[in-house]
Amino acid sequence: QVKLVESGGGLVQAGGSLRLSCAASGRTFSAYAMGWFRQAPGKEREFVAAITWSGGITYYTDSVKGRFTISRDTAKNLMYLQMNSLKPEDTAVYYCAARRGTTGWFFMVDEYADWGQGTQVSVSS
């Protein structure tokens, strides 16, 4: 059974930085892709970034390109989301997610079977 645990959220001023971590356990993830999603109050959960576990190929939603960087440490089974130049509109609960397969629609919530509990990111103006 896959277990995902996020950490690293918090309150930061606009323009600041945070690094989120996701600790993954329960499987060998070589044939997986992992992603970060976020959900703001009253809004649907949306794709932020994804990475293929084995090849390290990355994908980003347009609004975070150039500001956020997704990475993973395969030896430690950790995934990261480095968030720079944060904006108030980045405020949301951020979720780590895992899906089988390294092809397909990485931005779709339904493609991911396993989810963490979420970590709050709040950006003040």
Image (tube, rainbow, N blue to C red):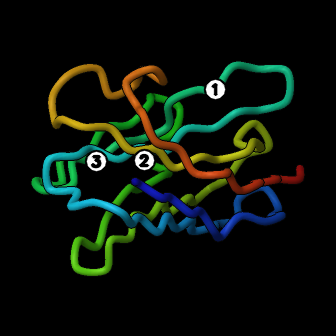
Residue of label 2:
66
* 55, 91: nearer the viewer: 55
- Please provide percent x and percent y for residue 24: 41, 64
CA separation, marks 1 and 2?
A: 21 Å
Q: Residues within 10 Å of mark 2 (few under 14, many from 20)?
A: few
In the rendered structure, the answer to whether residue 23 lies left or right of residue 18 reads left
In the image, residue 68 sits, relative to residue 17, either above or below, namely above
Q: Position of residue 85 (x, y in %)?
A: 62, 56
Q: Quadrant of residue 11?
A: bottom right
Mark 2 residue type: Gly
In the image, 49 versus 105, the foreground residue is 105
The CA distance from mark 3 to mark 2 is: 16 Å
Q: Amino acid at mark 1?
A: Arg
- Check residue 45 in the rendering and tell me which mark sits there, or answer none: 1
Give the residue pinned by disc 3: 51
Sequence-wise first label, 1 or 3? 1
Which quarter of the rendered picture does the N terminus lie within? bottom left
Mark 3 falls on what kind of element? strand
Image height check: is 110 above or below 21? above
| 17 left or right of 36 in image | right
Q: Nearer the viewer, residue 36 or 82?
A: 36
| 80 sits left or right of 102 in the view | right
- Helix, strand or loop under label 1: loop
> What kind of residue is marked 3?
Ile
Q: Residues within 10 Å of mark 1 (few under 14, many from 20)?
A: some
Q: Secondary structure at mark 2?
A: loop
At label 3, counting other C-alpha atoms closer than 10 Å, the crowd grade (few under 14, some 14-19, many 20 or more) is many
Mark closer to the observer (3, 2): 3
Residue found 63% across the figure and 38% down from its top: 38
